Amino acid sequence: MNSQTAPATIRGPSANLGRYFRNRTLVTGIALALFVLLPSFLGGLIYGRDPYELHLGQQLLAPSGEFPLGTDSLGRDVLALVFDGGRATLIVALPAAALAFVVGLLYGLASAIGPAWLDRVLMRTLDTFLALPSLVVLIFFASMITLTNTTLIMLIGFISWASLARLVRNEAIAQRGRDFVLAAEQLGGGRWYVARVHLIRVMAPILAVNGTFLIGDSIFALSALSFLGLGVQPPQASWGSLLDSALDIIALDPWWLLLGPGVMIFAALLASSLIGQGLNARFGARS
Amino acid sequence: MSAALELDRLSVALRRSGRDMSVLDELSLTIAPGEMQALVGESGSGKSIAALSILGLLPRGAKVTGSIRLAGKELVGLSENGLRDMRGRDVGMIFQNPLSALNPSRTIGAQIAEAYTVHHRSAPKAEVAARVHELMTRVRLEPAAERARQYPHEFSGGMRQRAMIAMALANGPKLLIADEPTTGLDPVVAGEVMDLIGELKRAGMAILFVTHDLSVVERHADRIHVLYAGKSAEWGPARTVLAAPRHPYTEALLNSVPRLGAERLRGIQGNLPEPEQRPSGCRFRTRCRLAYEDCAKVPPATTFQDDTALCWLPLDDAARATIQAEEVVAAHPPLAKGQLLTLDHVAVRYERPFGSFAKRAERDQLAEISFSVGRGECMGVVGSSGSGKSTLGRAILQMVQYRGDITLDGVSFTGLRGEARSAARRRIQVVFQDPKESLNPRLTVGQSIGEALRLGGLRDWGAIRERTAELLGSVSLPAAIAEAIPSGISGGQAQRVAIARALAADPEVIVLDEPTASLDVSTQATLLNLLKDLGRAKGLSYILISHDLAVVSYLADRIMVLQDGRAVEFGTSQSVLHSPSTDYTRRLVGAAAHVPAAV
């Protein structure tokens, strides 16, 4: 074989430095994600203490050797609650993000590759939808339906897909006119074929980045709902509801009640943002 | 009289994955006032690096050694401030693609004025206005007062390049560096820009003209300096180098340029070696057909009639004659009988996109085109940008709505729907201009070709792999390239892949839309040869769309000349070339006929 494959592009020292920083963004994001995921799914098993056991006479203790994050006003172990609340938050937020992702992707693709009238109908519907304040819609529906994990997943998925749909639609339309797409059509590839094989593949960076952001959005939305008492229902704890219960007795300055869920929500949102940015930079560097 | 520019053993190394990589090796050349020196080489030869190093615009971390003297003043080691003062004042520069160099939101006049005031901060308004007017008149952007108020989008490509030249001249530099300023322009317009640069030269300007295409500089260059893989190959007076090249590389470059009436292009096999993979001794030896053992040692410089070549076996007249005799001149096969593709009064109208408030375009992009193409015939479609030639190609490919009728093998597309239409479309394939755009960047070469086979109904993996290797072989690519992704292969290789993908559909017609316009001349030549051979071997009909009459005449049996969406000339290649009947065609023929036939 006498062909020269893969000529490396010329990189200055600044580009090398930039790559290091981009990698660090991604690596930091992944580390934070593990910091959130591992305790939420494995922490409870390892820690082994029942989060809902009431330690009578030991209410509102500050962190100590026995209760690393103290106890709440009912005498429950806060660390165990943070672990269990994390699991409860994530098993709703992650599927909700996945649902929003799939709906947004299909809606956007249908709009981009369907006939012009369909595009018009779908986009005007989307405009109307986006014009409604999503938190208000969320609260409105949450107050009307029975709140189970399944309905919460549907509800949060339902309010988060729209911005992704618009992004997918615009990007797909831009990519659809590229030469390799035209070549595929000339070879007999139909609309869904082109969408599946070509459009989704070239949009992979955008999808990965915005899909990651969706996870952060879902965690935030669920925590906000739970904080308002409209999310995960008691007695099951979640990060949002833990914050809410801390707020009830804020006058007593129980800082340790805010610490656990606060740090976890913050870490989860930061992780999703950093991973998104890191992916964005990596893909950007490649194409 | 001192030289305007003197490069003495100029070497440049760039930092690449942590190591210094030599990209330019001991380049020495001198340009006198009123002289044009052409710096010629393929992409990656180091020619643009040489130009950038004079301007002090190299990427950070680049190491420059040797000397650059501008009117006697040393530039190597000068501070960034010193370089900035020099740029634009002592040296003017023009580049390829003027549109990206112009600010779309400011008028042309304002941008030319800025080029002047950067170095004349305190110039009074009246002086600046007078200077702008003078510059615009000089580059013939007339009427200057009116043109100065226009924006870049109102200018044609040629006018934008003139505006760039006006900006380059704003401070009366002694040296003009032009890096491929005519690439991407229409041949007629490119000729006008070249004439303008020639005029500047006669007025005393020293010009360094960087290009990959010898035919561009043939009329105006005084001296030619050929670079190969960062090293000088041959330099001397333009007349001598063009008429009797001494270095095999120069000779091959000259024979890569399609000339009107040429039967066979030589081209150069293979690709320019990456800096890491350069052979020892003569760097061209891996692609040279005359290489022998001595070529592994550093070649000596031999000079003959002021023409110097770094070569162990510099060519003489006899050697050149031998090389040329080796070229196989295949006779045209007789045209197969029967019409394959017929266009009947095909017209395309610009469709206003939904939601746009633009005025509805009145004009047809393409008006009432009719012709037939026989099996195995190549139909050339020539015209400048905006002439509707690409639209015609897209109508044939059924990519746009059209009026009139197109029939393939007696079956009209008008009545076809669904599967039948899809199957008929498959029989017409396409090769686009930009090879990198025509391949999905996220698919491997093998996946792209495999896709074409799968859409044709081939399902078995083993069969797909086998057929892919076969198709790659038919476009002279190694089977192993199937694993590569588009960004890892060269433009010429990518274009071969695009041809292989088109062949995968077993087409009868291939629309070639400027298939070589974004390739180096050496690559263009081998690709045109490949297309010629494939067309004959498989009896393919081509619709070859190009702005370059020389390229079209090399392949086409008949030629249609389009202007403003109308066919202004139509006939056999011979008759169109030798007795053009319209003024427009005569200008196209004139623009294409620059390079004299080599001896």
Image: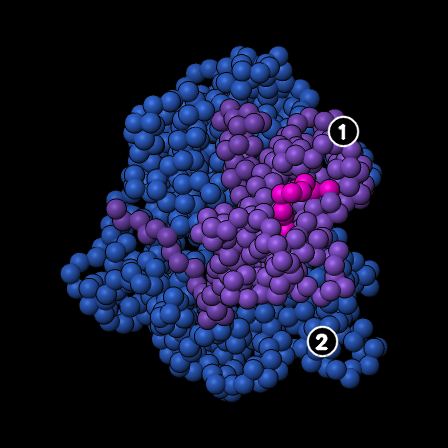
Chain colours: A purple, B blue
| The one of A66 and B353 positioned closer to us in this rendering | A66
Q: Is residue B597 magenta?
A: no
Indicate left or right for A172 with B309 as reference: right
Q: Is residue A260 above or below residue B435?
A: below
Q: Chain of mark 2?
A: B
Q: Is residue B331 left or right of residue A155?
A: left
Residue A172 is situated, as x and y percent measured from the top left of the image, at 62, 38
Where, by quadrant of the figure, is residue B335 drawn? Answer: top left
Q: Which segment did they paint magenta?
A: A230-239
- Residue B534 shows in this picture: yes
Foreground of the two, B421 or B379: B421
Q: Main secondary structure of the magenta part?
A: loop
Q: Which residue is mark 2?
A: B116
Q: Amino acid at mark 2?
A: Tyr
Where A104 falls versus A36 (above or below)? above
What is the distance, in whole Å, between disc 2 and disc 1 at their CAs?
Answer: 54 Å
Q: Amino acid at mark 1?
A: Val
The residue at 40%/80% (across/down) is B65
Q: Which residue is mark 1?
A: A121
Position of residue B226 measured from the top left corner of the image (x, y, whole percent): 39, 64
The secondary structure type at the circle numbered 1 is: helix
Q: Position of residue B434 (x, y in %)?
A: 51, 44
Seen in the picture, residue B292 relative to B494 is either above or below; the reply is below
